[in-house]
Image (tube, rainbow, N blue to C red):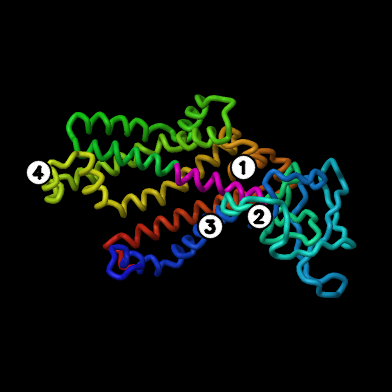
């Protein structure tokens, strides 16, 4: 952090918050993994090992027949095709190594590559978190699912925030009848039950659209309810700032209203905007999770954490194959990290906080 910058003191206070620092590290790891998804994931999310349906997670071993041979896993053989029961075959060993060659992918989304972070030397299936109904590696699907679940949150929040900045900024700056009408509309949206509003918006989404179009529609569905809260918050701040000397001076200089709002007023509340973004993303992630969990959001062939949770709707599957809940654990850790990071930022920017 550059010495003397406006963020120097907040950063020093933030560093003293251990939970905030841990959450920051977790979020950095999650978003860096988006760029390295093909490298970190052992397999493509759509790769199927049909004979490995609902295979349990592999246990990693080091010693075989009393001899240290390095990390390896034993072969799992299906003993009951109906109940998907497996037995460990200790006669067959699959050694694990880092940087093994495997399925092709695009590193950073455009560089062709084949090296994966880890895998078996002989190319045998390795399921660190188990497999799903179609024999697809759950870890790989969680890693690839982060692309939609994490980016959807940011995109939706920025769309709703932009709407809140424009509408709330104009409402607070213009005042009068325009302010009254805009705020009443915002309050109507705020009072609507959010999840049911999501369901209503999803019901009017056209069918038969491409995955890219579905991503766009889901982004807008999750962003629409968010603009109202942002608009009301921004409006209150604009009201408190619009009569300050620097705003009056800009008005006397004949600067256009929108330019005054975005170049003179909004920069004064950047800390509030940062906090709003940080604390809004978990809600969007949970919104997408809820829609996809019910089969109304992201669907095959795309992958998201909420879609992976759809398998947990069947209690029989959940009771027999509990590793299907790993995506839920990922969602909980991510949402908790965002909230912890957001409140740590709030304390760091609060001048009354001693830190």
Question: Which residue does the numbered mark 2 point to in the structure image?
Answer: 113
Label 3: state its secondary structure: helix
Q: Residue 331 location, x and y as percent?
A: 56, 50
Question: Which residue does the numbered mark 3 point to in the structure image?
Answer: 32
Label 2: state its secondary structure: strand
Label 2 crowd (10 A; few <14 / some 14-19 / many >=20): some
Q: CA distance from mark 4 to mark 1?
A: 54 Å
Q: Residue 232 location, x and y as percent?
A: 29, 40
Nearer the observer: mark 4 or 1; the answer is 4
Label 1 crowd (10 A; few <14 / some 14-19 / many >=20): many
> What number is the disc on residue 303?
1
Mark nearer the N terminus (4 vs 3)? 3
Pointers 2 and 3 in contact (CB under 8 A)? no
Left or right of 179, for residue 293 = right
Question: Which residue does the numbered mark 4 point to in the structure image?
Answer: 252
Residue visible at 13% across and 43% down in the picture: 251
Along the viewing direction, whichever of 6 and 294 lies nearer the viewer: 6
Bounds of the magenta span? 139-155
Which residue reaches farthest bottom? 67
Labels in figure, total: 4
Residue visible at 35% across and 69% down in the picture: 12
Provide the major secondary structure of the magenta segment.
Answer: helix
Label 1: state its secondary structure: loop
Residue 103 inside the magenta-drawn segment: no
Nearer the observer: mark 2 or 3; the answer is 2
Q: Residue 250 location, x and y as percent?
A: 14, 46
Q: CA distance from mark 2 to mark 3?
A: 17 Å
Q: Is residue 204 above or below residue 80?
A: above
Label 4 crowd (10 A; few <14 / some 14-19 / many >=20): few
Q: Residue 304 location, x and y as percent?
A: 59, 43
Mark nearer the N terminus (2 vs 3)? 3
């Amino acid at each position: 952090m550059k010495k003397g910058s406006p963020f120097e003191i907040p950063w020093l206070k933030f560093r003293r918050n251990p939970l905030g620092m841990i959450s920051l590290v977790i979020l950095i790891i999650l978003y860096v993994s988006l760029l390295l998804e093909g490298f970190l994931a052992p397999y493509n999310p759509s790769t199927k090992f049909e004979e490995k349906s609902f295979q349990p997670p592999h246990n990693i071993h080091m010693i075989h027949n009393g001899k240290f041979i390095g990390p390896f896993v034993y072969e799992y053989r299906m003993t009951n095709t109906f109940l998907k029961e497996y037995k460990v075959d200790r006669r067959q060993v699959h050694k694990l190594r880092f940087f093994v060659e495997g399925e092709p992918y695009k590193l950073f989304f455009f560089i062709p590559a084949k090296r994966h972070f880890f895998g078996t030397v002989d190319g045998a299936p390795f399921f660190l978190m188990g497999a799903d109904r179609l024999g697809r590696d759950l870890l790989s699907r969680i890693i690839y699912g982060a692309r939609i679940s994490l980016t959807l949150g940011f995109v939706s929040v920025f769309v709703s925030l932009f709407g809140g900045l424009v509408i709330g900024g104009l409402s607070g700056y213009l005042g009068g009848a325009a302010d009254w009408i805009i705020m009443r509309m915002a309050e109507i949206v705020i009072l609507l039950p959010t999840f049911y509003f999501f369901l209503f918006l999803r019901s009017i989404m056209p069918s038969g659209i491409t995955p890219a179009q579905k991503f766009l529609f889901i982004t807008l569905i999750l962003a629409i309810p968010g603009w109202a809260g942002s608009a009301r918050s921004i409006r209150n701040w604009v009201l408190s700032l619009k009569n300050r000397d620097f705003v009056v001076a800009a008005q006397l200089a004949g600067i256009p209203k929108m330019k005054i709002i975005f170049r003179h007023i909004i920069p004064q509340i950047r800390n509030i905007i940062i906090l709003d973004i940080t604390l809004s993303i978990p809600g969007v992630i949970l919104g997408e999770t809820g829609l996809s969990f019910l089969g109304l959001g992201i669907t095959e062939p795309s992958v998201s954490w909420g879609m992976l949770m759809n398998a947990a709707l069947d209690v029989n599957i959940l009771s027999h194959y509990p590793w299907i809940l790993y995506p839920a654990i990922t969602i909980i850790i991510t949402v908790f990290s965002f909230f912890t990071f957001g409140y740590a930022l709030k304390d760091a920017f609060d001048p009354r906080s001693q830190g």
